[in-house]
Image: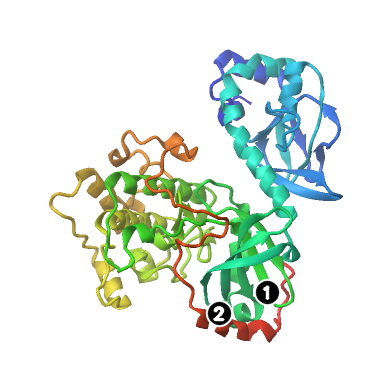
Amino acid sequence: MMRSVQSIPLLKDLSELQKQQLIDQTPLIPYTANQTILTEGAFGNDFYIVVSGQVNVTQAIDDRVVHLNTLSSGDYFGEQVGTDSLIPLNADAQAALQEVPARRNASVTAATAVECLVIDHALFQSIRKPIQTALESNIDARNQMSQDKIFAASISISTLERTKVLGIGSFGLVYIAKHVPTGRFVAVKEMYKARLETSKQMGHVLAEKDLLSSFHHPFILKYLVALQEERKVYIVTESLLGGELFQRIVNPAGVPTPLPMDSARFYAGCVVKALKYLHTRNVAYRDLKPENIHGYAKIVDFGFAKKLTQKTYTLCGTPEYLAPEIVMGIGHGFMVDNWALGILIYEMVVGDSPFADIKDDHMTICRSILRGKVEFRKDADPEWRRLVEGLLTREPTKRMSCLAGAVESHPWFNGFAWDDLLAQKMPAPWTPNVVAGDDVRWFSPVDTDELTELKEWDSVSPEKDWSEF
């Protein structure tokens, strides 16, 4: 029991005596899969901490049951906020303070076999002070997540009105759309089913949707909902109108414009946190590059991302960012992302990637990667150089890792306020001037000829079953 209590981040600031009180006075209650733990509308003031397993939080909205969140080990429900909040069950702690049971504003059901610590009113009051900061820091994030879920439940194809096209790809286009009932703007990735089938990309799109829908992190594109009709599928996300990081590194004429060291550190920090989040969830991103990081710095395109249970052998990614193990086809894992991070940090400071070829010949680039020679200016910052060298270590097992914390603790990041970055309290090096919800000035103009070519797929029906989308 003590091991369980010690492993819960929320309880780390409790004294040893308080932890012992929890062990002595708090039951560890098991629930079976699909068992109801709390019912929306019922009264109660207990505080729950998930020790093992997962629970689903749902809320009844307009005669529909909307999934708000999935909570796992270390998560909790019952923290203190106002009773009118949309955060699942946050009225509990207020009820504890008022010594009156509160009405549950959501239901909680065991998604798997679950064990929860159930803390009663009196004990919660005795430990509330040392955990109050942690509870309050989570309120905004939980509230935003719940509101996003409710908004997503109101989105349908008929409620979206396309305004500006952001880009065109092989399988469809990305555009800004207005959600007519609310006036909010979203980004929509629209793809033709038949085109995806012909290119054998159906599985990749299904995987991309499943992965993106499972993430919730400030530096990863926010997924809202997936939709489909007879010939098309749609992935709806938040709209990011600040353009690409690539535009901060290379000017419109194609001339490199290296970033100041502090700016590079800021953007690198965002990527480090995002990669650590992904790797903790056994996901390799595999396509890190300046074109896939937007605004305050968010990773956006998950077409190459993959859930890993063992080494994978797929050749994917951008040539200049490929790790040696991908080039050699010997199997790879998460460490390819750390290699790509090293390339990104180098490119931000220098203005070009270390293995670039003036003719952009892929074979020449790959040979340079395998040789592994990285050139540095004599006056290069020594800590920056050591970090890049650590990330661009050829042997994956010796390469510096985001997951292990080696990057965050590297001297190049000395004094860097990681908590402020994660809370987005740190001033960004550059803030885009966006005047409207569909202001696309920071994106390159779209080739209308490509849009015409895509229209050819309007009349082609898919042959496969897309019900899993």
Which three-letter amino acid code belongs to the residue tagged 1? Lys
Marks 1/2: CA–CA distance: 15 Å
Helix, strand or loop at mark 2: helix
Q: Residue furthest left?
A: 378
Q: Which mark is residue 145?
A: none
Task: Residue 455 in the image: state x and y as whole percent.
Answer: 61, 83
Compare residues 54 and 97 and report the one nearer the observer. Answer: 97
Q: Which mark is residue 232?
A: 1
Task: Residue 194 in the image: state x and y as whole percent.
Answer: 65, 81
Task: Residue 393 in the image: state x and y as whole percent.
Answer: 29, 55
Compare residues 283 and 40 and report the one nearer the observer. Answer: 40
State left or right for residue 149 relative to residue 244. right
Q: Residue 451 carries which label?
A: 2
Can residue 434 be seen by looking at this rendering?
yes
Q: Which of marks 1 and 2 is nearer the N terminus?
A: 1
State left or right for residue 390 relative to residue 203. left
Residue at left 29%, top 72%? 365
